[in-house]
């Protein structure tokens, strides 16, 4: 049955993919969306959530000149008519935000753009990100080396409809004579870091490299003012866990790899089952959750690790969303957004397969889900403890795998942080100010976005429901609510405007464009039913 389905899919998509096979990812078209930047944009009467963790306040008028916020003016108090004489004047463009909420644009620190076979056009991911109010993304990497840097440059010039881009790359990647796997000694490692710095990269996406190579990479990155994040893969974590890497100068631990291994109570490596095979992805992703009972929450090693991470100013970028399907794969498979926003090619990439990365549901069991639920309880406790002691926890999604879709996965990450014990104001701080601090720390500079205040770049989102009351209103699909006045169920929320670099995007129009892309591909592939 699976073979028949695969052959049918191949026949239906051969024409579609043949047009794309010369390029893994189709670059975004030239920008045709968005108004601005404006000489003097005024956003009128909204409630401000500034990104610092401060309580909401309003009504405020926010003045944007070009691509910078020049004034945040308090213009009254709730339930009292606004005195028009107190308001900023001389606008050239206005947004009426009365009754709405204004936040900094969201920052996703772990993204990939897609490409054949799952999402052939960069525009698809870009518009899903912007449609969810995501104005800055860190590609780890976005796609291949040259195209990642090219799209970053086009975004910086606002030549394309896309978030602001920071481009991180894996050792050995690049054009010229470089290839992945070529960085295998300290001298070559340093040479590669200097190379990507010259090319315009912002940082490195590392694995669990041997100590001498890891040290060389991180040392040279510091010299070049480049950032670093690491997926400390299970294949090398026994020699390079999160504490080892942090002591060498790593900036961010992404995912959870290396955290538990840094504080095992009675083991030095994970006690894998005798039939373990890392190349079998159900083994790889199913067994890693069995670490939950190898550590002692709030024990001596746990607390020592937290304290040392804090001293080293390590950022944790957990990306809980990308593994959340392990807790309940049925829930992930039936997300509200799949019908309208998930490309058929994306859906086929998710479907259980030994070829597609992250499609490891070969025979997912209740045992597996229970292990992941237990794992999340311990992981979330660690993250919340780190946050409570002043550690920086950020938001990343890694969407494009494991039933997680661009944009939607980022909002789910916000919800998961709340589940971990973060107040929604702390969640938003993680997704805005803390994300910006992580990106700017290697540069030794103050942040330029991530907070709404005078002098900052104008990166914002506007939503007509209160995200503090319900983070679900940030999903493109909104939140389901019973309207008692008419006795009917309706969907409320969804980002209304996304402002990046002073350019105002109609978020709902961007999302409509995505829905049209999905319809188009369904027609090209015979309008197959996703589920």
Image (cartoon, rainbow, N blue to C red):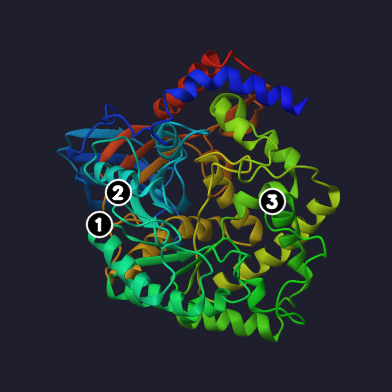
* Left or right of 60, for residue 109: right
* Mark 2: secondary structure: helix
Does residue 305 appear in this view?
Answer: yes
* Left or right of 312, for residue 174: left
Give the image location of residue 290, x and y in percent. Answer: 77, 64
Q: CA distance from mark 1 to mark 3?
A: 34 Å
Looking at the figure, which quarter contains the N terminus? top right
In primary-sequence order, the first of circles 2 and 1 is 2
The local crowd at label 2, few if under 14, some if 14 to 19, many if 20 or more residues have their Cα within 10 Å, is many
Give the image location of residue 509, x and y in percent. Answer: 40, 25
Check disc 2 and report the residue beneath it.
Answer: 149
* Mark 3: secondary structure: helix
Q: Are marks 2 and 1 in contact (CB under 8 Å)?
A: yes
Check disc 3 and report the residue beneath it.
Answer: 281
Give the image location of residue 58, x and y in percent. Answer: 39, 49
Check disc 1 and report the residue beneath it.
Answer: 199
Judge depth for marks 2 and 3 and give the one in front. 3
Determine which quarter of the picture holds residue 490: top right
Task: State whether residue 363 is above or below residue 74.
Answer: above
């Amino acid at each position: 049955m699976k073979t028949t389905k695969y052959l049918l899919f191949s026949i239906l998509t051969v024409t579609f993919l043949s047009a794309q096979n010369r390029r893994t990812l189709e670059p975004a078209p030239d920008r045709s969306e968005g108004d601005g930047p404006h000489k003097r944009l005024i956003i009128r009467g909204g409630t401000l959530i500034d990104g610092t963790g401060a309580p909401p306040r309003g009504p405020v008028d926010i003045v944007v000149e070009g691509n910078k916020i020049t004034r945040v003016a308090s213009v009254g108090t709730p339930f009292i008519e606004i005195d028009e004489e107190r308001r900023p004047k001389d606008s050239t463009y206005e947004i009426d935000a009365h009754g709405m909420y204004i936040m900094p644009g969201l920052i996703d620190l772990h993204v990939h753009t897609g490409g054949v076979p799952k999402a052939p056009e960069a525009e698809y991911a870009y518009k899903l990100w912007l449609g969810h109010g995501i104005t800055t993304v860190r590609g780890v990497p976005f796609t291949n080396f040259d195209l990642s840097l090219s799209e970053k440059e086009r975004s910086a010039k606002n030549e394309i409809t896309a978030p602001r881009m920071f481009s991180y790359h894996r050792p050995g990647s690049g054009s010229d004579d470089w290839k992945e796997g070529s960085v295998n000694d300290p001298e070559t490692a340093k040479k590669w870091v200097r190379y990507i710095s010259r090319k315009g990269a912002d940082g490195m996406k590392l694995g669990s490299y041997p100590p001498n190579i890891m040290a060389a990479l991180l040392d040279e990155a510091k010299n070049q003012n480049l950032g670093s994040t690491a997926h400390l893969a299970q294949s090398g974590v026994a020699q390079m866990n999160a504490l080892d890497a942090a002591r060498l100068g790593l900036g961010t631990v992404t995912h959870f790899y290396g955290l538990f291994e840094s504080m095992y109570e009675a083991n030095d490596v994970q006690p894998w089952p005798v039939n373990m095979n890392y190349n079998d992805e159900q083994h790889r992703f199913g067994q890693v959750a069995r670490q939950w009972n190898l550590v002692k929450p709030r024990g001596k090693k746990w607390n020592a690790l937290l304290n040392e991470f804090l001293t080293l100013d390590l950022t944790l970028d957990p990306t809980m969303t990308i593994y959340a399907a392990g807790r309940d794969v049925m829930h992930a498979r039936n997300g509200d957004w799949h019908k309208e926003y998930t490309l058929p090619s994306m859906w086929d990439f998710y479907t259980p397969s030994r070829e597609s990365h992250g499609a490891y549901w070969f025979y997912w069991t209740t045992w597996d889900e229970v292990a992941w639920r237990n794992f999340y309880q311990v992981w979330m406790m660690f993250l919340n403890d780190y946050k409570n002691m002043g550690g920086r926890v950020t938001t990343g999604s890694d969407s494009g795998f494991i039933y997680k879709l661009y944009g939607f996965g980022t909002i789910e990450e916000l919800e998961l942080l709340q589940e971990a014990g973060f107040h929604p104001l702390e969640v938003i701080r993680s997704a805005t100010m803390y994300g910006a601090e992580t990106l700017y720390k290697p540069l030794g500079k103050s942040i330029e976005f991530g907070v709404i205040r005078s002098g900052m770049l104008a990166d914002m989102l506007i939503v007509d429901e209160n995200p503090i009351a319900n983070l679900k209103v940030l999903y493109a699909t909104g939140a389901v609510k019973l309207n008692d006045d008419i006795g009917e169920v309706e969907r409320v929320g969804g980002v209304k405007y996304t402002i990046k670099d002073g350019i105002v995007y109609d978020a709902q129009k961007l999302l409509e464009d995505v829905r049209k892309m999905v319809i188009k591909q369904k027609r090209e592939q015979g309008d197959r039913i996703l589920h």
